[in-house]
Each structure stands twice: as C-alpha cells, then as structure tokens.
Image: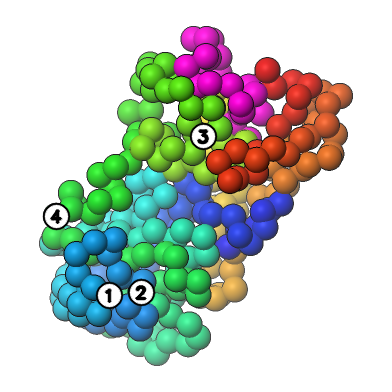
Amino acid sequence: MRVTEGVSSGAMPELPEVEAVVRALRPLVVGRKITSCRVLHPIAVRPSSGHGAKLAAARIEKSLRGRKVTGVTRLGKFLLMPLDRGIVAMHFRLDGQMVWFDSKETRGHIDVAIGFGKGTLGFVDRRHFGRVEFEEDPGKIAGLAKLGVDPLSKGFTREKFAQLLSKSTLPLKLFLLDQKKVAGIGNIYSNEAMWLARLKPMRRARSLSPIEAARLHKSIGAVLRRALKCCLHPAPNFRDPNWWFQGIEDILNVYGREGKKCRRSDGTILRTEQGGRSTFWCRGCQK
C-alpha cells in the first residue's frame, strides 16, 4: 500500500488509507468461505513471540481453511477480518498492500494467499515489515490490546481526548504518534491536524488549554475525514497490483512542503526532526 512522503512511497499507511481498504474489501470477501490458505513467505506471519515463522505458517494455513469471513473492520491501522471462529489481523506497516485475483492462480510476489474458491486475496509486502496474524481469541493479538482510542470512533470524545492530553508530558507531535493513546494517526495526518489547529508540534501535550484541546480534537476529525474521502475517490483497485492512493498530496497544507509559503499566513513551512520523524510546521501561525 504505497502512499506518497512528500508524499513519498516510504510513508506508512494511516487510518484513512486502511479504512478505505476495509470498505473496498468487504464486498469481495464477507460471507465467503475460505477454501485455502498458502503462506509463501513465513516471515509475514511470524509473531513477535511464541511460535517460530514456519510453525506459525503451518498453523495459520490449517486454521483458516473452512472458515467463513463474517466482516471486515478496522482498529487504528489494523485491518481485521472476523471469521465464524477466530479473527485475522493484518498490519501493512510501510509498504503492505492487498491484491485480488479472480481465480486460484496468483502472479508476482505474494506473501500470504487466501483462497475463496472463485477468487484469491493476496497480502503483499516486498520488504516484509507487514504482518498477518490469526487467533481464536482476538484478545490474544498483542498489538490490538495495546491500542488507544480510535479517532473515528464514538469513544473519541472531547472529554476523553482532553484527559489524555492532560496526563502526558510528551511533545504534542509525539503524543499524536503514540498508538497507545490515539490509534491510527501517523506522521502525515498528525502534522496536518496540528497545523489546522494552529498548535506548535513541540509544545507539551498537557500544556494545551481546554479551548486548544477542543480545537485539536475537531481538527483531527476534519483532517482524517477529508483524507478518507480522498482515499475513496478513486477507491482501491485490488485487481491492479500497482495501485496506490492518488491525490493525497493535493489536500496537504503542511506535510512535505518544507520551504514553501504557508497557505494561511506569511510564514514559511519548516521541517524539524522529532523522534526520528520529520515534522512540518509554520512558525508564523502555530503557537
């Protein structure tokens, strides 16, 4: 799943991109029975602990056969496929993507192939950072258990967000990237939300006033929904192995625009490094 940083191909898919994949994938797999599962590259199913890669591959191949997909949903940056027994969790990391073949035959690099009789869903990540996991009990997927509130869920209230901010001494940018606090925001949309809210990325999270916290809460929702709309038009095309999201750079006000004039003030967009990631901001209007 390639998103452009500046917007380059190394940018990690965030909540809007994963949500767009969820919506496009539902009509292809929901209600269908899995007839086969082939793990061509065991590293893609290697858990962080427990079974080794080969054992994990054999386990997921056996466990998925005969199961029916009951839904496709998302939590943070995780794509979830609940089954009639158990759940599949996928994380795309940097370059993971989904492909679809209208037959049992697959072409090109595929890490995990899930067959549905007439059609095959492939999980692809040439750099092997992405992961596919299966558990009978969703609570055993460690990555899910650690996630904070999803910013497009009903639980993401102004009160909840203000409470999280008030307890953190992290710089605002790093706070937004912490998936244990708010799940789904990454480097692109954290920059965009702070710019829209007129807040300096280096400020401590707990330094925000109630008015500023409410403004940032509203900005996060606005940025994510606008990005999602862009990601859905055009929608992901799983039949094209070279597809990626188009037009995202056209809606960005600050990310990847170092040295360019701010679209809201007379300031110039600056780039600063925070936590090993690039932060783009305007000194003229972000305080």
Could you tell me residue 194's position as x and y percent? 61, 28
Q: Earlier in the sequence, mark 4 or mark 1?
A: 1
Q: CA distance from mark 1 to mark 3?
A: 32 Å
Helix, strand or loop at label 3? It is: helix
Identify residue for label 1. 53
Residue at image coords 52%, 14% = 207
Density class for disc 3 (Cα within 10 Å; few <14, some 14-19, many ≥20) is many
Q: Which mark is residue 159?
A: none
Would you say residue 212 sits in the magenta stretch?
Answer: yes
Residue at image coords 50%, 49% = 14
Q: CA distance from mark 2 to mark 1?
A: 6 Å
Identify residue for label 2. 43
Q: Which mark is residue 137?
A: 4
Q: Which residue range is magenta in the image? A: 192-215
Residue at image coords 44%, 65% = 129
Is residue 255 or residue 215 the one in the foreground?
255
Q: Are marks 2 and 1 in contact (CB under 8 Å)?
A: yes
Is 82 located above or below residue 275 in the figure? Answer: below
> Which amino acid type is shown beneath numbered disc 1?
Ala
Q: Earlier in the sequence, mark 2 or mark 4?
A: 2
